[in-house]
């Protein structure tokens, strides 16, 4: 809402914001959707492929289903990644460990992390997509973004939460930690870019669990609070040094014990 107000966008019609693809294609590529068909000056409103305006699940091809899932999974990618088409992975993990003058932090509360996506907000994917546990979107948002450090609230659900997708974590060269509370509060998680091979790690420094007192008024219930303090280390820096896990002092990787 703040972004809408900032750019003076109070009312607009979704149907007027669909771009046209060449030929009979209905789903765009990364570069087409995020670069070619979006306004480079104004982030809102977002232009969308025509399939999101008018679609029934029974007329989707298999390729269109997978292409839509990839578009959804990439909404938090930086434009530089979209231009190159190179996601962070174990083979290029060291290349993303560069010294910068700022630290990007991202906090997400995605609710049911294994919830099934919809097309255009209401149309269901075919049943074979909905039944496939690998055809999810929200877990990818946690790892496909430009942040150095990602915090995730409500990291669990009845089918395993974010911990169920360790293969996605490894594929995107990210590592992290999920902390469960002893009270009935949902667990929280933190993730940092990098791998153990480049010296990245996460420590849990402290955890706070607290339940407030029940109020006397029937409409004034109690709060369940669960918070953690993490210490992330991003490992190898541009100069090739590493960070000692106990002292925080940098040392040359070749001279490490």
Image: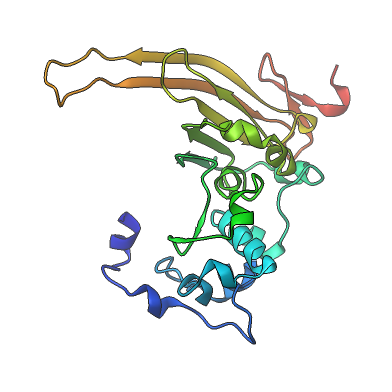
Residue 97 placement: quadrant: top right
Q: Nearer the viewer, residue 190 or 103?
A: 190
Q: Which residue is painted at 52% across and 19% down in the image?
A: 180
Against 36, residue 198 (above or below) is: above
Q: Nearer the viewer, residue 70 or 84?
A: 70
Against 210, residue 36 (above or below) is: below
Q: Which residue is painted at 49% across and 70% down in the image?
A: 52
Against 209, residue 85 (above or below) is: below
Colouring scheme, one of rainbow, by chain, secondary structure, one colour: rainbow
The quadrant in which the C terminus is found is top right
Residue 15 in picture, x, y percent from top left? 39, 77
Residue 146 in picture, x, y percent from top left? 59, 49
Q: Give the side of residue 122 with respect to residue 77, left or right.
A: left
Q: Which residue is painted at 69% across and 34% down in the image?
A: 166
Residue 114 placement: quadrant: top right
Q: Nearer the viewer, residue 204 or 252?
A: 204
User: From this viewpoint, which residue is outermost toward the bottom?
Assistant: 23
Q: How many marks?
A: 0
Q: Give the side of residue 14 with respect to residue 203, left or right.
A: left
Q: Give the side of residue 188 with respect to residue 257, left or right.
A: left
Residue 127 in picture, x, y percent from top left? 59, 56
User: From this viewpoint, which residue is outermost toward the left?
Assistant: 217
Against 104, residue 225 (above or below) is: above
Residue 112 appearing in the image: yes
User: From this viewpoint, which residue is outermost toward the right?
Assistant: 254
The quadrant in which the N terminus is found is bottom left
Q: Which residue is painted at 41% across and 18% down in the image?
A: 184
Residue 49 appearing in the image: no
Residue 53 in picture, x, y percent from top left? 45, 73
């Amino acid at each position: 809402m703040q972004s809408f107000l900032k750019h003076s966008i109070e009312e607009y019609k979704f149907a007027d914001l669909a771009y046209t693809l060449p030929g009979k294609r209905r789903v765009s590529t990364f570069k087409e959707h995020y670069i070619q068909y979006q306004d480079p000056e104004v982030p809102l409103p977002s232009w969308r492929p025509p399939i999101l305006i008018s679609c029934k699940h029974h007329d989707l091809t298999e390729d269109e289903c997978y292409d839509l899932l990839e578009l959804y999974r990439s909404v938090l990618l930086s434009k530089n990644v979209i231009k190159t088409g190179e996601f962070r992975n174990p083979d290029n993990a060291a290349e993303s460990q560069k010294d910068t003058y700022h630290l990007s932090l991202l906090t997400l509360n995605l609710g049911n992390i294994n919830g099934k996506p919809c097309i255009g907000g209401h149309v269901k994917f075919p049943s074979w997509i909905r039944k496939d546990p690998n055809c999810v979107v929200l877990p990818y948002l946690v790892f496909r973004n430009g942040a150095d450090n990602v915090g995730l609230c409500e990291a669990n659900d009845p089918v395993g939460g974010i911990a169920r997708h360790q293969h996605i974590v490894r594929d995107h060269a990210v590592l992290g930690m999920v902390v469960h509370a002893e009270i009935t509060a949902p667990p929280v998680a933190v993730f940092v870019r990098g791998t153990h091979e480049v010296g990245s790690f996460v420590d849990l420094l402290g955890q706070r669990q607290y339940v407030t007192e029940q109020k006397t008024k029937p409409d004034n219930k109690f709060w369940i609070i669960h918070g953690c303090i993490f210490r992330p280390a991003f490992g190898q820096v541009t100069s090739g040094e590493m960070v000692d896990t106990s002292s925080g002092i940098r040392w040359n990787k070749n001279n490490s014990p």
